Image (cartoon, rainbow, N blue to C red):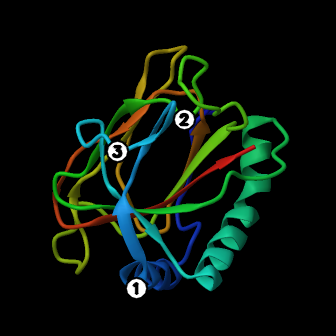
C-alpha cells in the first residue's frame, strides 16, 4: 500500500463548484508561509488565501471530516481534529516551492500537523473543460524511498500524505488552480 492516499471523486464536482463560487465572492490575500511568523515570500509561495463565508467553510470542514476516518485507517493512526481548512487559488505563475508542513527545523509551531490533505476544486490539462488549468502538479517525495509522486489535479480528488514529507506545487502555466488544504492532528 502506498503511503500516499489518493481518493478520486471524494467530493462531487457540483460541491467543488459551490466552494469555488464562495471563493469568487470571498476576500483574497497573499498566501503566507510560516517562517517564525507568517510572512509573504513570493519567491517561495505565490498563491492567494481566500476567506470564504462561514457557511461554506462549515460545509468544507464537514466534507473533510467525512474523509478523516478513511485517512486514519490508511495510515494506521488516530486522527482527532484539524488545524482548519484553507481555500487557496493559484493564478498563472502561482507555485509553492519544496517544503514540509511539519518540520522540526521550521520556525513556528507545526508539531500538531500529522497528515496534510488537499482537495482539488478543478482539473488540470483539460483545455476543453471551462475552468481547467495547466501546470500546478503536486509533487510529494517519500523521504524513505526518495520516490517522487506526481499527482495531476483532478476535480474532487483528495490526496493525503504525512505532513513531514517534502512536497511542492509546480507553477501554474494557464488558468486558475483552486484547492482546499488542511492538516489533520
Q: Which of labels 2 and 1 is toward the front?
A: 1
**Viewer-side residue, 70 vs 64:** 64
Count neighbours of disc 3 (C-alpha within 10 A) and say few if under 14, some if 14 to 19, many if 20 or more: some
Residue under the image location 51 percent in, 30 percent down: 36
**Residue 40 tag number:** 3
Count neighbours of disc 1 (C-alpha within 10 A) and say few if under 14, some if 14 to 19, many if 20 or more: few
Q: Where 19 falls versus 61 (above or below)? A: below
Instruction: For mark 2, give the secondary structure.
Output: loop
Instruction: Determine whether, in the image, residue 13 is placed left or right of residue 173.
Output: right
**Residue 51 tag number:** none
Q: Which of labels 3 and 2 is toward the front?
A: 3
Mark 2 or mark 1, earlier in chain:
1
Distance of label 2 from label 1 (alpha carbons): 28 Å
Mark 3 or mark 1, earlier in chain:
1
> Residue 172: x percent and y percent?
21, 53
Q: Which of labels 3 and 1 is toward the front?
A: 3
Q: Which residue is mark 1?
A: 25
Count neighbours of disc 2 (C-alpha within 10 A) and say few if under 14, some if 14 to 19, many if 20 or more: many
Q: Where 71 falls versus 123 (above or below)? A: above
> Residue 27: x percent and y percent?
41, 75
Quadrant where the C terminus sits is top right
Mark 3 or mark 2, earlier in chain:
3
Q: Which residue is mark 2?
A: 101
Distance of label 3 from label 1 (alpha carbons): 23 Å
Residue under the image location 56 percent in, 72 percent down: 11
Amino acid at each position: 500500500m502506498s503511503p500516499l492516499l489518493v481518493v478520486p471523486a471524494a467530493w462531487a464536482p457540483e460541491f467543488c463548484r459551490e466552494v469555488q463560487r464562495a471563493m469568487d465572492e470571498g476576500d483574497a490575500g497573499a498566501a503566507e508561509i510560516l517562517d517564525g511568523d507568517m510572512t509573504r515570500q513570493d519567491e517561495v509561495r505565490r498563491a492567494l488565501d481566500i476567506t470564504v463565508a462561514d457557511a461554506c467553510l462549515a460545509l468544507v470542514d464537514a466534507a473533510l471530516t467525512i474523509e478523516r476516518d478513511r485517512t486514519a485507517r490508511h495510515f494506521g493512526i488516530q486522527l482527532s481534529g484539524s488545524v482548519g481548512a484553507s481555500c487557496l487559488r493559484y493564478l498563472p505563475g502561482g507555485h509553492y516551492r519544496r517544503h514540509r508542513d511539519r518540520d522540526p527545523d521550521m520556525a513556528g509551531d507545526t508539531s500538531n500537523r500529522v497528515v496534510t490533505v488537499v482537495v482539488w476544486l478543478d482539473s488540470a490539462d483539460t483545455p476543453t473543460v471551462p475552468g481547467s488549468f495547466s501546470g500546478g502538479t503536486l509533487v510529494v517525495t517519500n523521504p524513505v524511498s526518495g520516490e517522487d509522486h506526481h499527482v495531476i489535479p483532478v476535480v474532487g480528488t483528495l490526496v493525503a500524505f504525512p505532513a513531514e514529507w517534502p512536497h511542492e506545487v509546480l507553477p501554474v502555466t494557464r488558468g486558475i488552480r483552486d484547492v482546499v488544504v488542511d492538516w489533520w492532528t
